[in-house]
Image: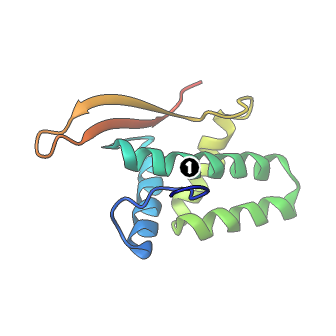
Amino acid sequence: MRHRKAGYKLSRKKDQRRALRKNLIKQLFEHERIRTTRAKAQAVRGQAERLITLAKRGNSAGAEKMIHARRLAAARINDNEIVMKLFDDIAPRFENRPGGYTRIIKMGPRHGDAAEMVLLELVED
């Protein structure tokens, strides 16, 4: 039984799963729109939205909390340019939005294996 087991395994081991999620989140923040499978998009969506909320709180807080929030985001993303973009460009766009920063649009099956493909993108205000 899967009671109280959160998250998706994505047919990968723990380290591969963590690397995949980090890469997908980095690509989402870099390009603001990625094409992936539905399972991967659902696995990444929650973490991406948490990082945007962290960036929003870090921008509105004092200097010490802003530094702490940037360090927490940098630990999860591992790319300073993307962290800067997240805090300077992406978070201010969602300042008045209480949540729901991403959207999943279905695109149909992939030709090779019929996996359900989706477009995961940041919502435009």
- Above or below 88: residue 22: below
- Point out residue 51 in the picture as x, y percentages from the top left corner: 63, 52
- Point out residue 7 in the picture as x, y percentages from the top left corner: 52, 56
For image coordinates 36% across by 41% down, the residue present is: 38
Residue 124 or residue 22, whichever sits in front: 22
- Above or below 28: residue 120: above
For image coordinates 38% across by 73% down, the residue present is: 13
Crowding at dot 1, Cα within 10 Å, few <14 / some 14-19 / many 20+, comes out as many
Q: Residue furthest front?
A: 1
Residue 88 or residue 53, whichever sits in front: 53
Which element carries disc 1, helix, strand or loop? Answer: helix
The quadrant where residue 4 appears: bottom right
For image coordinates 46% across by 68% down, the residue present is: 18
- Point out residue 15 in the picture as x, y percentages from the top left corner: 43, 75
| Image quarter in which the C terminus is found | top right
Give the residue pinned by disc 1.
Answer: 48
The quadrant where residue 92 appears: top right
- Above or below 60: residue 101: above
For image coordinates 61% across by 70% down, the residue present is: 75
